[in-house]
Every structure is written in structure tokens, then in C-alpha cells.
Amino acid sequence: MTKESLTRPDSPVSPSEFRQSLGNMEASATPVKIILGSSSMPRRKILAEMGYEFSVMAADIDEKSIRKEKPEDLVMAIAEAKADAIISKLQITDSQLGNVEQTILIVADTVVVYEGVIREKPSSREEARRFIKDYSGGQCATVGSVLVTNLKTGFRKGEWDRVEIQFHEIPDEVIEKLIEEGIVLNVAGGLIIEHSLILPYVKQVVGAMDSVMGLPKAVTEKLIKEAL
């Protein structure tokens, strides 16, 4: 509703209705603080592309201590643990945060699934090399979760997303360059298909690229809207 429609209505408006309209305008203008619970650069980039301003806080949890048989259950459980860890940090540093303003916490987790086996971050260069060699000429999938919590209302909801990826043959020299760079050691399954070295060998992606990168835009946007 515009200011003009409030001051010059087409039909009579009672004082109570007028005050309610003003209240709705003020409520809609209430700022919302967003915290991205991840130190991942791709996730930061994706959330920024979505048009949000946000701060970043890492969870610093032992993800290896959380075990589930199904990848969907695992990524949701890790996301829950990340959210709980960050909320605990916030309560220590600013116990009144939830009472002051609307604050949305977004956390996410991603694993790679290859031949039914869950793959997280490689534990060594050798494991990263083996992972990428396995993908060469074959396929794998990413399973990623997004969990959104409204720290003011207590609302919390999460969803997961799956993307299938097919590869052409990846030359050994390309694999070695990726290993030498070391970036693949910091991502689930050693998989970073947006990298300029690996992208030419991606045959097909069935699903959203942003999901593979760690933060599916459609799911994230949907959950933020529901949380508000």
C-alpha cells in the first residue's frame, strides 16, 4: 500500500483501519538480520547473488562424529548440529539477540554419493585423487541440505536437494593440477565442478548448479520466506 492510498482512499477508512495499515507498513519495514553459518566461499557467493546482506559465522563442529546411513539423513543431521553450535555461540556473545530483532540463521551441508557410498571431504591428497579418478567417465551425485532458523520466533525448517552429475574422461594432468592446487581437499567428495579446470569435462548436470556448489537458491529462498 502506498502513502497516497493511505491519505486519499477511494472509500472511507476508519481510524482503527488506518492505524492498522500504518502498523502493517512498519512491520514490513522491520529489518531482518541474516547469518550464514558457513565459511564456504561458494555459499557466500550464492547468497550474495540472491540479493541478501548477511554476516558469516562458522559452526566449528566435528562433522565426522555424526554418522547416518542415508546421505539425506546425514546432511540434515549435520545441518542441525551446525545450527545448534552457532546458536550456542550467539547466546554466549549476545544473549539478547533473539529479543532485539528478527534474525535468520542459514546453515547447509553437502556430501557426494558415488556408487551408493557417501563421500565427505577427502582426508588426503591420495584420497582426493582417487575420488576424481572415479568420477572420470562416470557419474556421481550431490546431496545437500539447507536449514533455516528464525532466532526470534524459534521457527526451524530444513530440506535436502539431490543433483546428478555425469563426466567425460578427465585427463590425469588435469587431476594432478587440481590436487596440486589443494582446493579439492576442502570440498565434499573432492568435487568442485565450477572450477575452470574441471568444468570442460562435465558432461551433464541434472539439477541446479548452485546446489552442487553448496546452497540451492530455490530451496533457500523458500525456507527464508517460510521462516518470516
Image: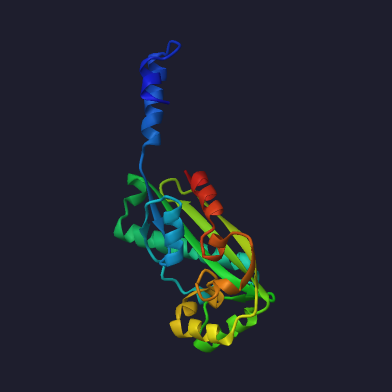
Q: Identify the residue at the far front of this view.
A: 200
Q: Identify the residue at the far bottom of this view.
A: 126
Visual colour scheme: rainbow
Residue at image coords 64%, 82%: 134
Left or right, 109 with respect to 52, comes to: right
Coordinates of residue 124 in the picture (x, y in percent): 50, 86
136 relative to 163, above or below: below
Left or right, 112 with respect to 7, comes to: right
Residue at image coords 40%, 62%: 86
Tell which of 90 and 204 is nearer to you: 204
Left or right, 192 with respect to 44, comes to: right
Left or right, 225 with respect to 118, comes to: left
Tell which of 190 and 105 is nearer to you: 190
100 relative to 37, above or below: above
Instruction: Give the total of numbered labels.
Output: 0
Q: Identify the residue at the far top of this view.
A: 12
Residue at image coords 32%, 54%: 95
Tell which of 77 and 148 is nearer to you: 148
Coordinates of residue 135 in the picture (x, y in percent): 63, 78
User: Which quadrant, please, contains the N terminus?
Assistant: top left
Where residue 183 sits, quadrant-wise, is: bottom left
Coordinates of residue 193 in the picture (x, y in percent): 55, 71
Residue at image coords 38%, 28%: 23
